[in-house]
Image (cartoon, helix red, strand yellow):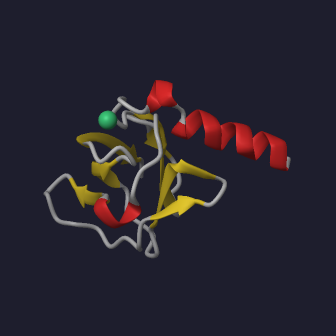
Amino acid sequence: MTRAALLLVTALALGPTQAGAHARLLHALPKVGATVSRAPAELRLWFSEAIEPAFSTITLSGADGRPATTGRLSLDPQDRRVAIVPIPVALPPAAYRVRWRVTSTDSHRTEGDFTFTIKP
Ligand SMILES: [Cu+2]
């Protein structure tokens, strides 16, 4: 991305039209509700506005509610609306739930969850 494009993206993310908006989940990998054939190495969530990683959590649990091991949440350095959570240990085939609670840069908190399945 060029510097000009990066500045434009930053301006859009911080611009006055977005200031009152809450961070909504736009897209995720694995995709919301998806069935995938390989264990993902990370969760990646795209929000509608920039979030504060220190005040945001994304957790992963199995269908039995047991938490799965995940690494530390970070933001894509190119786009602070994109949260990344590493999954250091390969997940066995099963259904999983991702719960997110995030604080956007306007200090509003939002939360939600979605599921995905790793097929055997
Ligand atoms: Cu807001």
33 and 94: which is toward the camera: 33
Q: Residue 76: horizontal and vertical position, in percent?
A: 59, 57
Q: How many marks?
A: 0
Query: Residue at the right extreme?
Result: 2
- Above or below for 47 versus 77: above
Q: Quadrant of residue 32?
A: top left
- Above or below for 18 versus 46: above
114 and 52: which is toward the camera: 52
Look at the image and tell me whether residue 47 can be seen: yes
Look at the image and tell me whether residue 1 can be seen: no
Q: Residue 4: horizontal and vertical position, in percent?
A: 82, 42
Q: Residue 48: horizontal and vertical position, in percent?
A: 46, 34
Query: Residue at the top extreme?
Result: 17
Q: Residue at x 41, y 74 (%)?
A: 71
104 and 106: which is toward the camera: 106
Q: Residue at x 46, y 75 (%)?
A: 88
Q: Quadrant of residue 66?
A: bottom left
- Above or below for 96 versus 115: below
Q: Residue at x 42, y 66 (%)?
A: 73
Left or right for 9, reference 67? right
Q: Quadrant of residue 56?
A: bottom left
Q: Residue 42: horizontal and vertical position, in percent?
A: 50, 61
**Which quadrant of the figure shows ligand 1?**
top left
Left or right for 64, reference 18? left
